Image: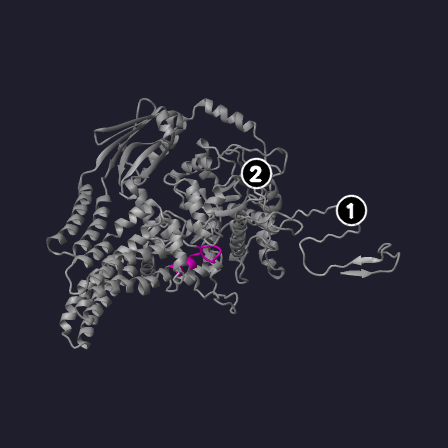
Amino acid sequence: MTERGPAGGEFGGGGFRNVFNGNADIVVQFRDNYGDIHFHAPPAETPEDRATRALAEAVFRQWREEAKVWDIGGDRPSLAVRWKPRLQWARRTAPNEAADAPRGDQVPDMVAGFLGLPQRRLVILGGAGSGKTALAVLLTLELLKRRLTPPGGGEPVRAVGQLPVPVPMSMASWDPERETFDAWFIRRLAADYPGLPRLSGRHPAAELWKRAGSVVLPVLDGLDEMPAARRSSALHGLNRALYDGRPLILTSRTEAFEGPARDVMLRSTACLEAQPVEAGDAVTYLATSTAPHVRPRWQPLFHRIRATPTGPAASALSTPLMLWLARTVYADPATDPAELADPAAYPTRQAIEDHLLDRFVPAAFDGRVPSEDRWEPPRRWKAERARKYAETLAEHLARAGTPDLAWWRLHEATTWARVAAVPLLVVAGFLALQVSILAGETIWGTAGRSSAVGGMLAPASFGFGVLIGLGAQLAGRTWYTELKFGEPRRRVHLLRPGAALRSAVRATDRKGLSGALFFAIPAFVVGVRSVTRPADGPLVWRICGGLCPVLCVLLAVMYAAPTDRAEDATTPRILLRSEHAAVLLGITVIGPVAGFGVGIVELGRSGASALSAGVAAWLGASMMLVCVSPWSRWLLGRTTLALTRRAPWGLPRYLADAHRQGVLRQIGGVYQFRSVRLQERLAETTPLGARRRARRSGRDALPPEAITHTSDAGIAFRLRVRRTNVAPLKRGVTSGVLLTLVCSMWGGTWLLLGPGLMLLGFLLTLLTRILPPYVVDLRLNRDTLECRWRDKYASRFEWRHVDEVAVHEFRPRGVSTGRHLLQVRLRPEALTPLERRAHDPGWRIVCDLGSMASLPPQVDAALKEYSAYGLQPESFALWERQFDSDEGWGG
């Protein structure tokens, strides 16, 4: 609006001034205009920009909550961890050689230095508990803050390449020998963040990653958590994936990165290594983290750290993890941190670290409830019980060889659950069959007909239902290649069939379709049998009955499709709720459809026959849909652990509380321990873990007579290898069960085919176990690696052609066989031009190790020693010239 002012006053000769009230994006004020006025509004947000912004917001919300749980960032005291550039393991491109080493309490400056790198690639190294993951999370949050709230409070950054969107992920689930980094990262991005806006009807993960100048920044945590045999392959895969100048942040323990980095260099990558926290910084952190009235309890420890900076106490408290543990363990006023300064009680650094790790879980579950007014406040857990439960979880992860704690795999934590699975399935089937027989007798008796006849007709209909349920479950599991069998169905929409159907069509590929059709054979056989068998009813009823099993398969596939959800990110609780919904879907939708299909065929005989057959088929299909599901295995695992007092009955609540208390961290749909060092310590303290390690060390060590020093300065080993191959048993059981169920439609001698196939698989596997072990002669020297086994196979490789040596399991078509092979990866120059054009990975068999999953320690040490001779002097000279020309970290 316009207001009149005094003539010739402060508003000018016109005596007018303009006053604006309201909201607007652009406000322009002028007095005189003699030409055209052109307004150039900012470009509209594209669908790619909306998907990128949604991803940034989802990642920021998720990891801000994790940072709160970890007690880092925000207004928390920050540690002045110094990060030293390491030129010998990765190539530098930062220009300022005289710049000071970055510090952990100066995250904005570190982000500026990272953004100043030409390729924006950074490797973060350090020892256990040195703060690698914490720094990666802080860098992630700082980058997201700058992108979502740029200086001046303007619109979020949209320009591609200005500020990337960091996405933290754990590398433990990546198998670089079977899946490219691009495929793995896209799959994990779509699974962990399913609710992003669609691009052309599809999840935007592939588009955001593959587009030119990708704005997605992978923050890969835990190269050291991968099996040692995969690390070099992982670095090779990263080099191939980062071809177009894509950014990267990678964390790893120094010793786990050094081995692969000798042969594989990440291109155009800066590398920082954590330095020990100085004594003064450690005292400052602990002092500022405690209240003034309890600070006198810490003074003896502070004095000891300052007086002896190289002593056990100062050395132990030189990592962020141990400092955080000390602050947590001694937060209770009844504890005395001065005991760490006693050299008699804790004479070494290892003793102090073990003490803090042992006390951490009881201190985290100290029985105090932080806030009773919360919607779901933490429970009160007894400290010793809580520690025992954590030890059970750590021991399970140690046996599985993974840091990922997935609730759908917890049944593997106890032998009792695996042993009881098959008997419980038989018992469940028997009880469901008895209920169907009782229902048939009741229905026929109510209809005034012979109840005994209704009971005799029920088992056949129950078997039809079992076949339909099994076919629907297996087909739904194998249709989508991104959903592995045994994993929970991530997203189920009971009331959105249209959206589920569209998602199923988009996610269908040829490989999944062919596998699903094979496993849907039992349901298809039931449909064909319903149409072709003689019956009293009209043909249209039999056709409807034949189509219902096919409809059950389609429903199972449609509702298992990876559709979008409203949640920002996948969590273990979301996956558990989704699996509950999938089980409910099977009981309330797929089961009734199967019952209707079997019952309508019997409608021509009588209404009682149709109703009893439908109820029996519904019970059979529902029983199979529930029993062959991750939810049933989860229920079996948690029940078995609770009965053996190794886990609480409220295991989901315990896991959630452990996450809130900082014992566990949440990565996508799985939990992980806050630190691998904590997981290792908890696993070490269990009696089962100690016995297993003792047996393994005694079994793997070679006797002295099996080792011979040869005249060419080499070593010869004689290994006695036991044969094994469990693939025939696995294939025989799977195929035999399906064949038995299918042949049950016709009965007679056809029923012998399935058990015969299972018996054949069992005999072949048993034969491989009872055959005498064979001898493997392995010879190593400075020039070659030679092997001869079974007196007829031989191999020979020169070290100058060898890029990597590893033990891999033999898995034809993805089936575990129990056999292991010692293999070498050849360098590209050792491959033929045809092999290079075919992208041959270069793995060649050295020898067959049978059931030997790992090499004896003497053989492993010799391989590491002699493989170093494959690095020619000219290679060393080339690397030294390259390192000398590199620059240090700078901004």
Q: Give the range drawn in magenta.
A: 564-578
**528 or 870: nearer the eye?**
528
272 versus 579 height, above or below:
above
**Residue sitting farthest toward the right:** 8
Q: What is the distance, in whole Å, between disc 2 and disc 1 at their CAs?
A: 62 Å
Color scheme of the displayed model: one colour
Circle 2: element type: strand
- Residue 243 belongs to the span the image colors magenta: no
Residue type of the residue flagged with mark 2: Lys
**228 or 359: nearer the eye?**
228
Q: Residue at x 35, y 35 (%)?
A: 806
Residue 807 seen from this side: yes
The residue pinned by badge 2 equals: 84
The residue pinned by badge 1 equals: 34
Which numbered disc flags the more N-terminal residue, 2 or 1? 1
**Residue sitting farthest toward the left:** 749
Image position, residue 482 (x, y; %) = 38, 48
Mark 2 against mark 1, which lies toward the viewer?
A: 1
Q: Residue at x 48, y 37 (%)?
A: 242
Q: Say which quadrant the C terminus sits in.
A: top right
260 versus 744 height, above or below:
above
Q: On the rendered structure, is 181 left or right of 289?
A: left
Circle 1: element type: loop
Image position, residue 209 (x, y; %) = 48, 43
